[in-house]
Each structure stands twice: as C-alpha cells, then as structure tokens.
C-alpha cells in the first residue's frame, strides 16, 4: 500500500464550478498535510496546509481533513482556467519521521 | 534572498556515465529531499536527509547516491546503475519539528540520456 494515494484523473470541470480533489494516507501517525499545485514543467508550489480535523479555508480554496478516515481533500470554488494544473497531496510524519511523502497527483483541467 | 537552488537546469548524460545534480539552500533547513518525476506522474522520493552526515533511502534509491557533508548542500549522483535516468529531478528542503513546516522546492533539473 502506498503512503499517499490520489486519483490520478484527469479531472475536468467547467469554469465556475467546484473542483474536488481527494487524497488518502496510510499512516495514522501522520501529523500534517499539504496541497501543492504544479504547472507543467515547473516545481510544485504550496497552496494549502492543514493539521487539525475539519475545514480550513483560504480564498477559493478549502482543505478538509478527517483523521479517523485518513482522508484529506481540496475544494476549489469558482474554478478558473488558470487553476488547470496537477495537484499534489503531501503528508508529513508518516512512520514517526519528518519525511514528506507525496501522492502521484491529480491533473485538473478547467474548461472555459 | 533565501531559497533553494538547483543546478544545472538541463543536463545530458551519456550511457554509462555518472552525473551529479547540485542542490543548495540558505534557509537553514535541517531536512532535504530528492524527488524524481516522470512525465505525467507524481513525485517519487529518492533520498532524504534530516541531519548532516546522515540520509535515508526513499522508494526508488537504486542507482542513486547522495551525500550531506554540509547542512546547506545535498548533491545527488545518478550512477550508471540507474538504467532509466531520464526524468525531472526536484530537490526540496524543510524545517523539522513544527507540524506546519512546509517544504520549499528548487526549480528542478531535467536530465536526459543521449
């Protein structure tokens, strides 16, 4: 079982819709969770982090964490074509260490 | 300016050759990481280090080697034992301890076998 799993997509949504990206992780000891956005050929950039159960909102982005279900998600409201990218889920603290494990990413396309 | 620098941006390797990718950070971060990314794929962990002179294998360490002689530097050598090295290589660094410590990425090195 992989440490972090994401649906690879691709996920397509129309402009203005809500995009929902999901991630599950295997280690219950994981401490914190990150969502990165990566444009083609570029390095990942952090857009959200969360470490407590519940929702965390930042502008059009909402991260949701459910530690009991080992599930973290990212919602993008009012999706824009510029949101088209690969979204990577990352988990820290697996196996009691400080290493950072990434999922394989979900490719999102926002259709104008 | 603080940051993490990878060089070169593009690198070409001949069959059977070892090449070294550079990664330097001036963020005073304890942890450093090397990831490999293949086209259309996510990041796979090659090696990581949490302290000078110590490092751990990731998921795909075979054919790679690293060193951590200084806190600021974490070079990656792609050896001739790595049979399919063509990929995008990303170096990252992060603090240890605080739960919300984020990883900072370099701009990446694109390695091609010729």
Image (cartoon, rainbow, N blue to C red):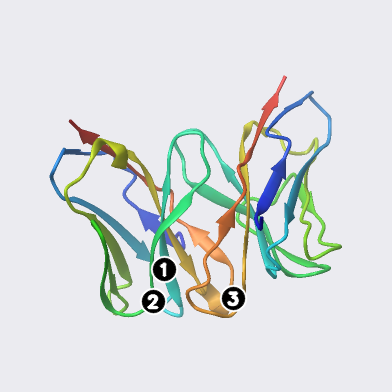
Q: Which is nearer the N-term, disc 2 or disc 3?
A: 2
Secondary element type, mark 1: strand
Q: Residue at x 42, y 60 (%)?
A: A4
Residue B31 is left or right of residue B37, and the answer is right
Query: Residue A110: where, in percent of width, then height?
Result: 23, 37
In the rendered image, residues at marks 3 and 1 fall on the same chain: yes
**Marks 2 and 3 in Cβ contact (< 8 Å):** no
Q: Which is nearer the N-term, disc 3 or disc 1?
A: 1
Residue, disc 2: A51
Chain letter for the residue marked with disc 3 in the picture:
A
How packed is label 1: few (under 14 Cα within 10 Å), some, or many (20 or more)?
many
Residue, disc 1: A33
The label nearer to you, 3 versus 1, is 1
Above/below status of B26 relative to B99: above
Q: Which residue in the rendered view is the most extreme toward the front?
A: B1
Q: Which residue in the rendered view is the most extreme toward the right?
A: B69
**Marks 1 and 2 in Cβ contact (< 8 Å):** yes
**Marks 3 and 1 in Cβ contact (< 8 Å):** no
Q: CA distance from mark 1 to mark 2?
A: 6 Å
Question: Is A93 in front, or is A75?
Answer: A75
Secondary element type, mark 3: loop
Q: Residue A73 is drawn in which quadrant?
A: bottom left
Residue, disc 3: A97
Chain letter for the residue marked with disc 1 in the picture:
A
Above/below status of B99 relative to B65: below
Q: Residue B107 is drawn in which quadrant?
A: top right
Q: Residue at x 29, y 79 (%)?
A: A53
Above/below status of B97 relative to A5: below
Residue A29 seen anywhere in this rendered image of the structure: yes
């Amino acid at each position: 079982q992989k440490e972090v799993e994401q649906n690879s997509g691709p996920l397509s949504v129309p402009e203005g819709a809500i995009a929902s990206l999901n991630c599950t992780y295997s280690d219950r000891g994981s401490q914190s969770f990150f969502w990165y956005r990566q444009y083609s050929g570029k390095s990942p950039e952090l857009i959200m982090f969360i470490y407590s159960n519940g929702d965390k909102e930042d502008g059009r982005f909402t991260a949701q964490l459910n530690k009991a279900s080992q599930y973290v998600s990212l919602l993008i409201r009012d999706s824009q074509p510029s949101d088209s990218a690969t979204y990577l889920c990352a988990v820290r603290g697996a196996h009691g260490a400080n290493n950072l494990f990434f999922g394989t990413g979900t490719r999102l396309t926002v259709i104008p | 300016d603080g940051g993490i620098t990878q060089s070169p941006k593009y690198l070409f390797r001949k069959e059977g050759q070892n090449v070294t990718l550079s990664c330097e950070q001036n963020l005073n971060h304890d942890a450093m990481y090397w990831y490999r990314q293949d086209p259309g794929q996510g990041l796979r962990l090659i090696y990581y280090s949490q302290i000078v002179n110590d490092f751990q294998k990731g998921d795909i360490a075979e054919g790679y080697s690293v060193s951590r002689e200084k806190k600021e530097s974490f070079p990656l050598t792609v050896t001739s034992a790595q049979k399919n090295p063509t990929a995008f290589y990303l170096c990252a660094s992060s603090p240890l301890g605080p739960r919300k410590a984020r990883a900072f990425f370099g701009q990446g090195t694109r390695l091609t076998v010729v």
